Image: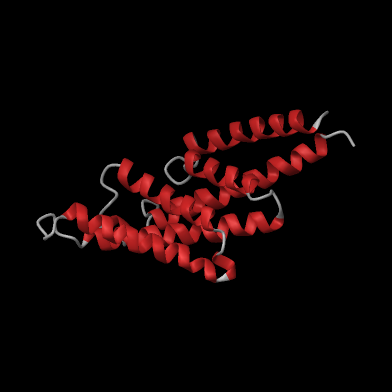
Amino acid sequence: MDKLTALSLSIGLLSGVATFLAVGPASGIFFIWAATIAWAAYFFLGATKEALINTIVCGIFGVVMAWITALILTEISPEAAPGFSILAAVTVAVAVVVLCLAANIPQLATIPASVLGYSSTFAYLLQTPDKLNQEVLLSVSLSNPLLVISISIVVGTFFGQFSGQLAAKWTKE
């Protein structure tokens, strides 16, 4: 079969498996939206061994940076001057500058993957009730975004690799 059809079928098949895991046995510890972001990043970065490594390493680096940012945000009092909104904005701005400057380290040079990890972490923290607090952020539990978003990024990246490998097996030479 042609390359596009093979890739479409492999991605479709494996997305069904990933969805089953996310809504079934891995519900609450594997988030399909975070996994598919990493899956797409793997292909966007070239679908190579280097893309696999960069998506995972930089994605998790982004998760760590967001986690640190979230911890700092939980320390800001709602009554703080000049106001929570301004202090939160400055905190995020500084964290993102650090995240981007970390690209000077070759292993952290894939800024888009780092940003995807950062954004996925805040999506989880801001859209899931009762997660943006120190109790969750400092827990050794599957509610902690350090764990669940990192797991989702790793699993999603490998789903990307597997879908590419499966498509290659189905493609006409």
Q: Name which residue lies at 33% across and 48% down.
A: 125
- The colour scheme of the drawn protein is secondary structure
- Identify which residue is drawn at 59% across, 44% down: 39
Instruction: Look at the image and tell me in which quarter the N terminus lies.
Output: top right
Asked if one can make out residue 68 in the rendered structure from this viewpoint, the answer is no
Give the image location of residue 165, x and y in percent. 75, 44
Q: Tell me how many marks there are.
A: 0
Q: Position of residue 76 (x, y in %)?
A: 18, 60
Residue 159 in view of the camera: yes
Counting from the top left corner in percent of width and height, residue 24 is at: 49, 35
Vertical order, 52 against 124 (above or below): below
Residue 172 left/right relative to 123: right
Nearer the observer, 96 or 133:
96
Residue 110 quadrant: bottom right
Q: Quadrant of the C terminus?
A: top right
Residue lying at the far right in this picture: please name it: 173
Front residue of 91 and 33: 91
Q: Is residue 27 left or right of residue 159?
A: left
How far across and how far down the image is residue 86, in percent? 21, 55
